[in-house]
Image (spheres, rainbow, N blue to C red):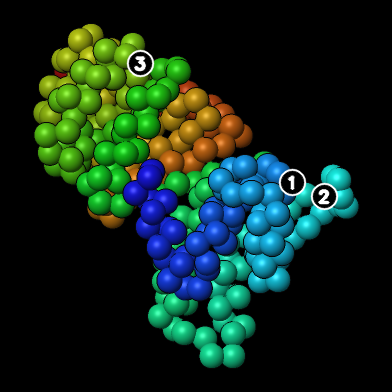
Amino acid sequence: MENENLSLKKTLEYIGFSEKEVLVYLALLELGKGTVTQISKKAGINRPTGYHILASLESKELVKVSGKEPKQEYIAESPDQIEKMLLKKIENDQSCINEARKIIPELKSIHNVTDRPKVLFYEGREGMEKVYEDTLTSTEPIRAYASVENMHSGLPGYFPEYYKRRAGKGIAIRAIIPDSETGRERKSFDSKEKRETALVPKEAFDFIPEINIYDDKVMIASWREKLGIIIKSTEIADAMKKIYELAWAEAKRLEVQSENKN
């Protein structure tokens, strides 16, 4: 996370933010809203400087003010405003606009907006590992749709240790997996790896992305796009859990049906 913030800071400075504007802007995004005292404390600057910087950000339409002193609060506008701010400049720099567009999704992911789902995006091998590491924070059994072949080819060498660590933390998992030789092999380790597997017909349910549902999160690992996504929303996670229970009941029925045929 520290490296990600450093990259954001450098890009924001490149497109025209001062060093202290970056500190205050990122602090306010994470808070969503706050008094000058709260924002200055989080940004690590003194209160008078906080007033000055917030006024500057307000003039750029990145911050709006609500109420009056002593209860005045500053509210972070959507990071989309950064692009609009740059486009308003008489001599806008296209390279700055391009760089801004690259970081706006990440800025949105840290923008604390009440009642809005938080969506985090991760790319590449390192990013894919990050989303799986987050599942190890689960306080309840994980509900999963998974294709073992795609998992192992997507992150070679990662999962044997991951399975051990998950089980070691006492985090159970239920997994709906396409029926294949690899899937059956993985199922044979269910007891050791604290997992319950339901095998479904591969010809009908050969899905590629993995989906994990746990606590207030939905994790999606897209193997073709090498993209990891975490959606943090109690409402969305709860709906996905209910849908999963329907899928699990049918998956177990199909598994029993297949076993009876054999």
> Which residue is the site of mark 1?
35
Are there few (<14), some (14-19), or many (20+) residues within 10 Å of tag 2?
Answer: few
Count of all numbered marks drawn on residues in the image: 3
**Nearer-the-camera pick, 69 or 131:** 69
* Residue located 77% across and 49% down the image: 73
The type of residue carrying mark 1 is Thr
> Where does the N terminus fall, quadrant-wise?
top left
- The one nearer the camera, 203 or 172, is 172
Question: What amino acid does circle 2 point to?
Answer: Gln
Is residue 196 left or right of 10 when viewed as pictured?
left
Image: 40 above or below 95:
above
Task: Please report whichever mark, 2 or 3, sits nearer to the chain's N-terminal start.
Answer: 2
- Residue 210: x %, y % from top left: 32, 38
Q: Are marks 2 and 3 in contact (CB under 8 Å)?
A: no
Report the side of 132 relative to 214 (left or right).
left
- Considering only vertical position in the picture, is 142 above or below 74? above
Q: In the rendering, at what x and y percent does residue 68 appear? A: 88, 52
The answer to whether residue 261 of the structure is visible from this angle is no
User: Horizontal and vertical percent for residue 23?
Assistant: 53, 54
Figure quadrant of residue 234: top right
The numbered disc on residue 171 is 3
Q: Secondary structure at mark 3?
A: loop
Secondary structure of the residue carrying numbered label 2: loop
Between 139 and 188, the residue placed more toward the observer is 139
Q: Earlier in the sequence, mark 2 or mark 1?
A: 1
Along the polypeptide, which appears first: circle 3 or circle 1?
Answer: 1
Q: Which residue is at 49% across, 46% downward?
A: 119
Question: Could you give the CA–CA distance between mark 3 and mark 1, rounded to whole angstroms?
Answer: 40 Å
Mark 1 nearby-residue class (10 Å; few <14, some 14–19, many ≥20)? many
The numbered dot on residue 72 is 2
